[in-house]
Amino acid sequence: MRVDLRRDRARKKTLDPRGEIAHMAGMTQALEEQIAHLTRTVEDLSNVVAKQDVELRRLTGIFDLLAQHARDREADGGGGVILGDERPPHY
C-alpha cells in the first residue's frame, strides 16, 4: 500500500498558535532588519548623490569660466596658430 506523505502531514498538522506566532515574529524581525538595511542603503546613496551634485556644480562653474576665457581670447585675436618650429611671440 502506497502512503502519500503530503496528505498525512496535512492531516497531522494542527494549528499551533504558539508556533505560528513564533514563526510570524521571526518573519517580522527578518523584514524589519531588511527594511533597516535598505533604509541605510538609500540614505548612503542619497549622500553620495548630494556630494556628486555639489562636485558637478563646481566643475560646471569651472568649465563655464574656462569657456568664457577661451571666447574672450579668441575675440581679442590672441589665438594665433604656431606653424612648424616657430617660437611663440612671448619667448
Image: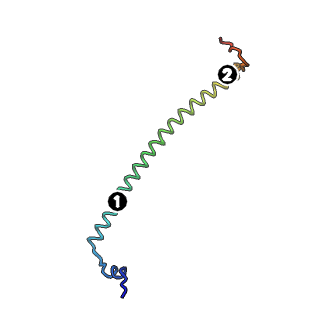
Relative to 60, 6 lies left or right: left
Q: Quadrant of the C terminus?
A: top right
Which residue matches tag 1? 30
Badge 1 amino acid? Ala
Relative to 55, 90 lies left or right: right
Which residue matches tag 2? 73
Q: Secondary structure at mark 1?
A: helix
Badge 2 amino acid? Arg
Q: Position of residue 64 (x, y in %)?
A: 60, 30
10 Å crowding of disc 2: few (<14), some (14-19), many (20+): few
Q: Residue at x 28, y 70 (%)?
A: 19
Of the numbered discs 2 and 1, the one sitting upstream in the chain is 1
Between tags 2 and 1, which lies in front?
Answer: 1
Q: Position of residue 49 (x, y in %)?
A: 48, 42
Most distant residue in the right direction:
83
Q: Position of residue 17 (x, y in %)?
A: 27, 73
Give residue 76's quadrant in the image: top right
